[in-house]
Image: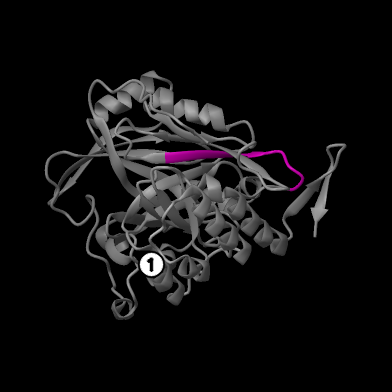
Amino acid sequence: MTSYTDKGEKHQRGRFLSFHHLSFWVGNAKQAASYYCNKFGFEPYAYKGLETGSREVVSHAIKQNKIIFVFQSPLNPGNEEMGQHMIKHGDGVKDVAFQVEDCDFLFQKAKERGAVIVKEPWTEEDEGGRVKYAVLQTYGDTTHTLVEYLGPYRGIFLPGFKEPMFRDPLLSTLPPGGLNFIDHIVGNQPDDDMVPIADWYQRCLLFHRFWSVDDKQVHTEYSALRSIVVTNYEETIKMPINEPAPGKKKSQIQEYVDYYGGAGVQHIALNTSDIIKAVKHLKSRGIEFLSTPDTYYEQLRKNLKTAKITVKEDISVLQELKILVDYDDMGYLLQIFTKPVQDRPTLFLEVIQRYNHFGFGAGNFKSLFEAIENDQDARGNLTVYMDNGDRRAFY
C-alpha cells in the first residue's frame, strides 16, 4: 500500500466541492428507485417525466441524508443512445456528478488539457433558481457532470424536477438505512488501462494520487488487482481506479469488465456512523451481503492483539454480521460489501465506517476476493489459466 502526500497543482480558480449525485441508466426507473428505497432506506426525493414536461427521459431522484441517486429511463422506443447503452451494459451508473465552483473555468481547463467534451456549459433555471452544467467523458461510457449553483437554489433538487409522484407509506414503517454520504466510487478498467485513466484525472481535472496498491500487495491464490485512488485538491472526492492482474483464475475485476462490456462504476461506498446498526437494518430489509469465514475473525483477534490495536466494537458482533476490519497505526475502518444489485455480476454497494483511517481496506482485499470468488464459482465464472496461456472454465 502506498499513500501520497503531494497534492500537485491547485486550480487557479474554482474548486471541486463534493459528489453531487449519481445518475443510473436503467430499464425501468420507477421500479429501480423503488428497489433502492425499499432495500437501502432511500426516500423519494424529486421527479421529472411526462407530467412535468419531460417527453424523452423520465428521472426518479431518491435521497438518503447527503446521498442522491437519480434513475433514468427512456420514454420512447426511438432513444437509441440509452437503449444501446442498456443492451451493452445492463443497469448501471452512467454519470458521476460533482458540485463545483466556477464551472466555466474548470471546464475550459479540462478542455485545454485534452478532455473529451460531451456537452459544453449550459444553464437551466426555474422558479427555484439557476444552475450551470457541463459534461465530460471519463472511462468507458461513463461521464462526469459539473454542477454549479448560480446563487441560492430553492427548488427541490435541480431545475425541472418536481415533487415525487408517489410516496410509499410502508417505507416509514421500515428501519432507517443509516447511510450518510458517498465515501468513494470505484471504477473498473480493462487490464493496462488503470494508469492512463488515473493520469487523465490528474491532467484534466487536476486531481492527485492519494493511495495505491499493486498485485504483489493484493492477491489470493488465484486472482489479483491493482488500484490507484485519485482525489481532488481538497480530498473530498475519492475515485479508486482498479484493473485486473493476471492470475490462475478470472478475477472479479475481469468478470465485471466482461459482463459490463468495458470500463464502468463497479461499486459505490456509502459512509455510515454506525455500521452495526446499519447492517442489521439493511439485512432486515432484505439486503444480501458477502460472507466471510470465521477463520478471518480468529486471525483478526490475533493480529489486533499483536499490533496492540483496540477496536471498540465487539468482534463477536462484527463476526456475526460478517463486517470486515482494516487498520493502521492511526485508526481503523469497518466495511462490508453487498452482492451485485442486479442480475449481471456488475454493480454492488459497500457500507463503510471510518475511525481516523483513510485507506480502502487493503488488509481485507484478500478476504473480499475470496468471498467474491465463492460467488463467481457459483455463477460458473471462474477461469483457470493454463501454462500455455490458454484458459478453461473452472467448476
Residue 312 highlighted magenta (yes or no) = no
Residue 112 % position (x, y): 37, 18
Compared with 300, 208 (above or below) is above
Disc 1 residue crowd, few under 14, some 14–19, many 20+, Cα 10 Å: many
- Picture quadrant where residue 149 is located: top left
From the viewer's side, name the closer residue of 212 and 325: 325
Residues in magenta?
A: 239-249
From the viewer's side, name the closer residue of 230 and 94: 230
In this rendering, would 176 be left or right of 293?
left
- Tell me the residue that label 1 is attached to: 278
Quarter of the C terminus within the rendering: bottom right
Residue 205 % position (x, y): 37, 28
From the viewer's side, name the closer residue of 111 and 330: 330
In this rendering, would 266 be left or right of 180?
right
Compared with 389, 361 (above or below) is below
Residue 30 % position (x, y): 40, 66
- Picture quadrant where residue 227 is located: top right
Look at the image and tell me whether residue 24 can be seen: no
Compared with 229, 290 (above or below) is below
**Residue at position x 63%, y 62% in the image:** 295
Predominant secondary structure, magenta span: strand
Q: Hey, what amino acid is under mark 1?
A: Ala
**Residue at position x 43%, y 21% in the image:** 114
